[in-house]
Amino acid sequence: MKRFLAPIFVLAAVVSCTHDPINPDPNPNGSGLCDPDTVYFANEVLPLFTSNCADAGCHGDSNPADGISLTNYNDIMKEVKAGNPNNSEVYEVLFETGNDQMPPPPAAPLDSLSKWKIYTWIAQGALNNSCNECDSNSVTFSASILPTIQAQCQSCHNAGNASGGVNLDGHGNVVNAVNNSGLMAAINRISKPMPPAASLSDCELAKFDKWIADGMPNN
């Protein structure tokens, strides 16, 4: 398969470039309450691809680069071997370096937590699964806001590639973007819609609203 995957982002966890086995507990659910031991395609995996790989000229539905579209489950599964992440091109390509890095510069390499999510989703059978649980009351920056920023925004809005002059690396920059750069209008698609490829979910937007109402703490 030819190289692919356009901008993705930064978040820290524990996956090494040696592809050490993770051996997750495959306990996939259908729609319903979220199981903390399951990685859900619709909630966690698809947003990584739609927000960062489906831009014009990359891997969207219209003239996808290398003929590879990554906008829906069926197309993504063409690059996946269910239950076998280390033989799935969509996972293996994330460990390229230098000129072959995917996503390509100036985007940062895909962070360890996002790689772990893709690995675990594939290891758990690469199911077309989802869950509907939304806790918009117990909201923290580190667990509720930062993962969405990193998964949906930081490929274009980071210290090395601050598109539109907006850097979303870290708590202080996110607060500044809310106060001075119209972040909420953008993610609510009132002004220039962000992320461009897909809207944030109602649950994600509710968490932003709660965090802002709480005074935007760095918690």
Image (cartoon, helix red, strand yellow):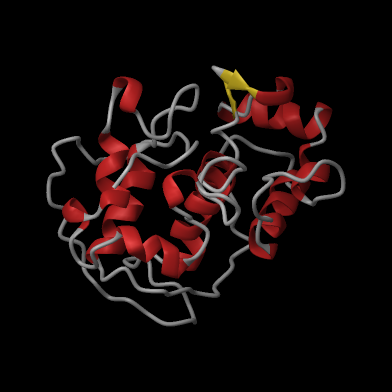
**Residue appearing at x 34%, y 63% in the figure:** 78
Q: Position of residue 61 (x, y in %)?
A: 57, 57
Q: Residue furthest top?
A: 160
Q: Does 129 sit left or right of 212 as displayed?
A: left
Horizontal and vertical percent position of residue 39: 37, 63
Quarter of the image for residue 170 reads top right
The answer to which of 197 and 167 lies nearer the viewer is 197
- 167 vs 212, nearest the viewer: 167
How far across and down, in percent of the image, does residue 10 sit? Answer: 45, 34
- Determine whether 144 is above or below 162 in the image: below
Query: What residue is shown at x 20% (from left), y 37% (from top)?
Result: 16
Most extreme residue toward the right, as rendered?
190
Q: Residue at x 72, y 20 (%)?
A: 165
Q: Is residue 162 above or below residue 26?
A: above
Q: Looking at the picture, does residue 184 appear above or below residue 40? A: above
Image position of 101 with respect to 61: above or below: above
Numbered marks: total: 0
Locate the C terminus and report the quarter of the image it occupies: top right
Q: Residue at x 60, y 53 (%)?
A: 62
Which residue is nearer to you in this view: 28 or 47? 47
